[in-house]
Image (spheres, rainbow, N blue to C red):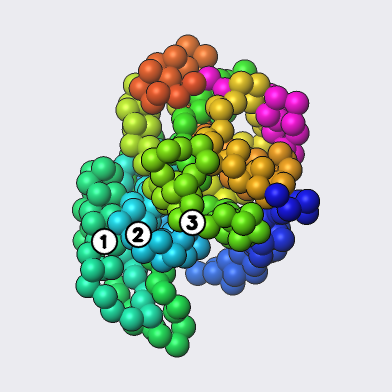
Amino acid sequence: MNDKHLTYAGSGVDIKKEESTIKALTGKMTYMRKGLGAPLTNIGHYAGLLDFGEYALAMTTDGVGSKVLIANAIKKWDTVGIDCIAMNVNDILAIGAEPIAFVDYLALESHDDSFAAQIGEGLRKGAEFSRMSIVGGETATLPDIIKGFDLAGTCLGAVKKDKIITGEKVQVGDVIVGIPSSGIHSNGYSLVRKIIERSGYSYNDPFPYSDSKTIGEELLIPTRIYMEVLDVIDQCNVHGLAHITGSGLLKLQRITKLGFDIFDPIEPNDIFKFLQREGNVDELEMYRTFNMGMGFVIILPHKDAMKAVELTGGKIVGNIVESGIRVKELTIV
């Protein structure tokens, strides 16, 4: 283990600088359509929302990120399509919408039919699990730009306007239900790869916590798709939803200005313990970078909490408080 504490910013991804870039980019996007398809204003959330009569259309776009480099390293590409679908669908779910259609974008350095078939298989599995159609996409051959490949996509969802969940109903005393993640999902891989690089391990070495997987296979476990959230919305009075992605628990700030007291967190997956140990990563940095075993959060009144637990296989992890985000004695913000 290297004595130096590794960080997400040190691996090349500075969340604060990224936020500044986003503000500079979106600050120039001032044109707004009127009438049918007009954006629903004053909603800054996981998905963009468009006026569509009785409904709102929800749109997201996301990619697999540098996780594709690990897929390339071990020549296993059949799961990254699931990641591409999941990262978009989970953001659609986080506004209370149901995913209905998807388009993908695959940028390539060169063509290989076997590789493309594996990408397609993952996209098929993700779409099937999400109960939506892939209605098109784009493939671009860009040898002067792309080394390997990049995979991204855009998801369309729909929700009745009176069913949109933005977090405005969240109040002190509400219960926080956390749903277990399948692992790292598809965020933080710049730090992950830096940790493995310095650890002395390779992606083909056995994962120390498992007799059946290599480190690379463990790192490629696809992102969980949280479709059961729709059942919770249908049967419970949901006040807020969060998909925990890049920047970890800081994502909870998207829901409400109120605070989160996570007094009984979900036990982090073994992969997080391995990365923290090998990278000598501070606990605070781990929770500000990764989902740490909790990939999705539902906030709802106490009377509905156990029903949400039953429907999702999650657990009650905490309560809404006046301010801050805490995990046991650790202050996240």
Q: Residue 201 occupies which quadrant of the picture?
A: bottom right
Local SS, label 1: helix
Residue furthest toward the top? 303
Q: Looking at the image, is 232 positioned above or below residue 43?
A: above
CA gap, disc 3 and disc 2: 12 Å
* Numbered circle sitting on residue 76: 2
Q: Residue 329 occupies which quadrant of the picture?
A: top right
Question: Left or right: 123 with respect to 176?
Answer: left
Horizontal and vertical percent position of residue 118: 26, 61
Residue 76, visible in the rendered structure: yes
CA gap, disc 3 and disc 1: 19 Å
Horizontal and vertical percent position of residue 276: 65, 43
The answer to the question of whether label 3 and label 2 lie on touching residues, with beta carbons closer than 8 A, is: no
Instruction: Let me know if residue 318 is in the magenta part.
Output: yes
Disc 2 residue type (three-letter): Lys
Q: Tell me the magenta residue range.
A: 316-333
